[in-house]
Image: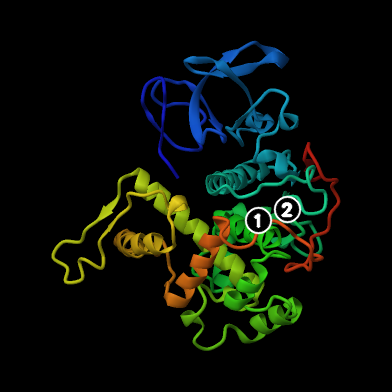
């Protein structure tokens, strides 16, 4: 992610900031600009709007979720039923009157907005349920019921469900340990599940399907049987030579989704490192050249996966070492080998439009069991009771 600065006072800003700590200006993010702007109010009450500081010709309104301090994005007056590019894809949000739910939902929105930042940067199609009632992207943020099965995070026909419990650090860590995962974050969930959405958009029924099967395997294999086998037997021997994670071994759909998620991890983190001018140049190390890196390019614009990997490997070695110096786990607890890098290369070419396209012709077969749906599609989002 790029660095932002206040146009009024020059203060460096974070993506999630709603107010400049330097001059107190209100802030709003314009996805079309890919920039965070200082804004000034115009009008009042129902007619309240905001202009970019120093540019009276540009008038916006804040996303309706700004009233919950859950969004700082801007949109044109009258657009999207008052919801920004990211929030208009919400179908169900938690019951905010329940203690603790608002804080958890804000964490989910922060992760979701970072996801959308990267999707916009990559130029990936973001199709709403209103535009495509059958396959449009829609989010369900659901809390566990008092009795019965817990909410399962998953994807079904463009509908992404994220369990609200995943926003609780303690609960998410408990689940990570129970499942023996090296990494589990809210942002990771969003990136993994949106990968299933993009498999349907960019692979299913397109010229990319054959090449995708050649590198990830045939997705027509029974997903239900594969999932049972994975949880009964675990990953196959030698899986680290071919898969980025143990879960990726479950089924070709999951291999694609895990690899796609890691691609988003790499692109966004390298983008941030580049914004900070990060350079890795170890001193007095025999392998200094192999561990050197200079992130001076835009990852999403790279011609191939090679420069991303060449920068990523030394960068993660350095930051894993820094984390260990603080007694923390590795920033990136994974190993990339040639087979995995080849898969990342496929994803890089796919998102750049070099293979496939959005021409779906096949019926959708679900990689995840659907979550019960009680809320109608479309804004405003339903609220759990």
Q: Helix, strand or loop at disc 2?
A: loop
| Residue identified by numbered label 1 | 165
Q: Distance from label 1 to label 2 (Cα)? A: 7 Å
Of the numbered discs 1 and 2, the one sitting upstream in the chain is 2
Residue under the point 36% across and 25% down: 10
Question: In the picture provided, is 340 more to the left or to the right than 306?
Answer: right
Dots 1 and 2: beta carbons under 8 Å?
A: yes
Residue under the point 67% across and 53% down: 164
Residue 145 location (% of width, % of height): 78, 56
Residue under the point 72% across and 56% down: 161
- Give the position of the N terminus as an image quadrant: top left
Above or below residue 218? Residue 145 is above
In front of the other: 263 or 345: 345
Residue under the point 59% across and 45% down: 116
Above or below residue 232? Residue 20 is above
Q: In which quarter of the view is residue 336 placed? A: bottom left
């Amino acid at each position: 992610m790029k660095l932002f600065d206040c146009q009024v006072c020059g203060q460096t800003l974070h993506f999630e900031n709603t107010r400049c700590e330097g001059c107190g200006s209100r802030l709003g993010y314009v996805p079309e600009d890919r920039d965070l702007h200082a804004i000034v109010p115009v009008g009042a009450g129902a007619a309240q709007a905001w202009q970019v500081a120093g540019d009276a010709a540009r008038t916006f309104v804040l996303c309706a979720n700004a009233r919950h301090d859950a969004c700082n994005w801007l949109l044109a007056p009258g657009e999207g039923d008052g919801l920004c590019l990211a929030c208009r894809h919400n179908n169900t949000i938690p019951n905010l009157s329940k203690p603790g739910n608002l804080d958890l939902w804000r964490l989910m929105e922060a992760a979701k907005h970072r996801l959308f930042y990267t999707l916009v940067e990559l130029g990936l199609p973001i199709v709403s349920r209103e535009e495509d009632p059958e396959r449009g992207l829609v989010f369900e943020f659901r809390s566990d019921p008092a009795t019965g099965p817990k909410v399962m995070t998953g994807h079904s026909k463009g509908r992404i469900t994220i369990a609200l419990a995943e926003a609780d650090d303690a609960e998410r860590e408990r689940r990570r340990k129970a499942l023996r995962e090296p990494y589990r974050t809210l942002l990771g969930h969003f990136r993994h599940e949106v990968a299933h959405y993009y498999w349907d958009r960019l692979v299913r029924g397109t010229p990319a399907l054959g090449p995708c099967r050649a590198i990830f395997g045939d997705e027509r294999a029974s997903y239900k049987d594969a999932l049972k086998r994975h949880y009964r037997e675990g990953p196959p021997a030698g899986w680290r030579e071919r898969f980025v994670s143990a879960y990726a071994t479950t089924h070709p759909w999951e291999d694609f989704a895990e690899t796609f998620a890691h691609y988003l991890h790499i692109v966004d983190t390298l983008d941030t490192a580049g914004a900070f001018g990060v350079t890795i140049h170890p001193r007095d190390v025999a392998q200094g050249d192999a561990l050197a890196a200079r992130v001076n390019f835009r990852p999403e614009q790279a011609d191939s996966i090679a420069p991303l990997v060449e920068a990523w490997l030394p960068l993660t070695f350095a930051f894993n070492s820094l984390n260990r110096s603080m007694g923390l786990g590795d920033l990136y607890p994974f190993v990339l080998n040639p087979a995995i890098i080849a898969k990342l290369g496929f994803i890089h070419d796919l998102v750049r439009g070099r293979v496939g396209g959005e021409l779906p012709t096949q019926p959708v077969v679900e990689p995840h069991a659907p979550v019960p749906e009680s809320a109608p599609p479309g804004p405003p989002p339903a609220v759990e009771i």
